[in-house]
Image (spheres, grey):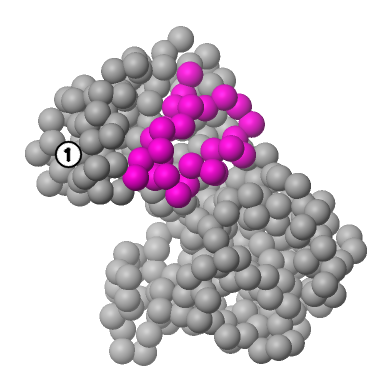
Amino acid sequence: MARVLLIRLSSLGDLVQELPIARALHDLGHAPALVVEARFAGLLRLVPFPVEVLAWRRGVAGTLALRGAGREYDVVVDLQGNWKSALVGLALAGARVHRAAAGQLRERSSTLVPSRHVPAGNGVHVLERSWHVVRAALGLTLDAAALPAPPLLRPSGTEALDAGLEALGLGGEAPLVACLHGPAADPRSWPAAQALGLERELGVPVLHVLGPRERGLDLPPSARVLRQDASDPAELAALAAVLVRRGGAAVGHDGGAMHLLRACGARTLFLFGPQDPARTGPRDGVVLRAPVELACRPCLARRCRLPEGNRCMREIGAGEVGKALSALLAAG
């Protein structure tokens, strides 16, 4: 058995996407541990198998606080591949951190930090690329296709959420659709105007979920809105449990909340515009892309550069999403 320390500091979606690796290591008889940004450490309390957590706080002091902690582990692997994770790895375990090949790092210049680079792999999806590094570091033969699928997290209690839904007129056990919104300025976000037409298309109640970054998003009084004041994974896990129990589903853009709901076992429909689902989408999940060809896709920009805005999301119509959700709900 090897003690394996995985460095995956952020973001929430990327961290959730790497959970099959921790599960696979556990199932193979190894002891997984994760270094994560402190604000995401609560997520790992939902993991239904033993996993050690090292919380990292942003900044030089937070990085230096981890000095030498990696010596307790047999293998240390950087799954993030940028300057931030490289420096954290250096503090943890010096030059013995395993990282992707130089050409496959998120920030190639971070090769200036001493480490052990594995040979390049041919995977496209972020999970495939990460698993390639872990396989090389440990000498494993298990293919990425055999990695565990959801559910990977254990949903929490739903009492508070059930009471909140009752107050919104959404109580009972009938199917429910949760529509997760994003900030209006985020190119990945599906416009609220389209989302508000979903209930008419579906004939199924829609709960509009707004997180801390969507505080400025105003929806009409007729919309049933669940506002989250903090990025609490337990709240999202409770929502996933309600959707599973009631035979519902969630729809939203490629963000951390959607990946977390799926990891808890909820049915999900991911809407993809600027990003490439083959790279960051849900593995073997249901994805809908706008029927429009744009030379600027895929795009990782924080602001859309098109004069007319993010056409790749605006051209996903409520009718199209409604049909895809209806098929998902009918699948049982």
Residue bearing mark 1: 102
Q: Amino acid at mark 1?
A: Ala
Q: Is residue 331 visible?
A: no
Work out whether residue 327 or residue 172 is closer to the camera in this orientation and state it. 172
- Residue 236 lies in quadrant: bottom right
- Which contiguous range is marked in magenta? 31-57
In the picture as drawn, the residue positioned furthest to the left comes out as 112
For image coordinates 35% across by 35% down, the residue present is 7
Q: Is residue 277 above or below residue 132?
A: below
Q: Which element is circle 1 on?
A: helix
Q: Position of residue 162 (x, y in %)?
A: 81, 60
Q: Is residue 224 above or below residue 248?
A: below
For image coordinates 69% across by 44% down, the residue present is 155
Badge 1 density bin: few <14, some 14–19, many ≥20, Cα 10 Å: some
Is 19 a magenta residue? Answer: no
For image coordinates 31% across by 89% down, the residue present is 307
In the picture as drawn, the residue positioned furthest to the right comes out as 172
For image coordinates 52% across by 17% down, the residue present is 28
